[in-house]
Amino acid sequence: MVIIENLKLLREKAEYKQFEVAKILGVTQSAVSQWELGLCNPEYKYLSEMANIYNCSLENLIQAINLCEETKPKRDSPDTA
C-alpha cells in the first residue's frame, strides 16, 4: 500500500530545504511554501522535476498535492449584515 505523503514530507525526506527546491525549479521560496501549505498548486511544468527531486513517482506527487488541497483551510464567506 502506498502511503500518501504531503509535499513538505516529500521534500524533507529528500533532504532539501525550500530555497533549494525553489532554486532548482526557478521559482521563489514563497511559491514552494504556498504549494506545501496547499494555498495554490504548482504548474504542471514543474511536476516531473519535483518528482525527480523528491525521488517519488509522479502519481505520488500528485496525490500529495491533492492531499494538501483537501486539507487547506476554507475561507468563510463575508458577512452580509
Image: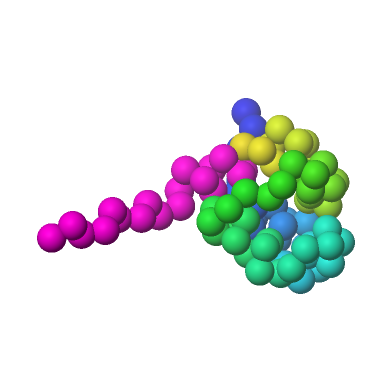
Q: Residue at x 26, y 58 (%)?
A: 78
- Where is residue 37 drawn, in percent x and y? 55, 59
Image quadrant holding the C terminus, namely: bottom left
| Percent coordinates x, y for residue 43 in the rendering | 72, 47
Which residue appears at 84% of the width and 62% of the height?
26
Given residues 58 and 80, the one toward you in this image is: 80
Q: Quadrant of the N terminus?
A: top right
**Is residue 1 shown above or below 43?**
above
Residue 22, image x, y percentages: 78, 64
Q: How many marks?
A: 0
Is the residue 73 above or below the residue 63 in the image? below
x%, y% of residue 65? Answer: 61, 44
Among the 4 quarters of the image, the one containing residue 73: bottom left
- Describe residue 42's horizontal placement relative to residue 50 as left or right: left
Residue 76 on the magenta segment: yes
Query: What range of the chain is rendered magenta?
Result: 64-81
Q: Is residue 6 magenta?
A: no
Q: Residue at x 57, y 40 (%)?
A: 66
Q: Residue furthest left?
A: 81
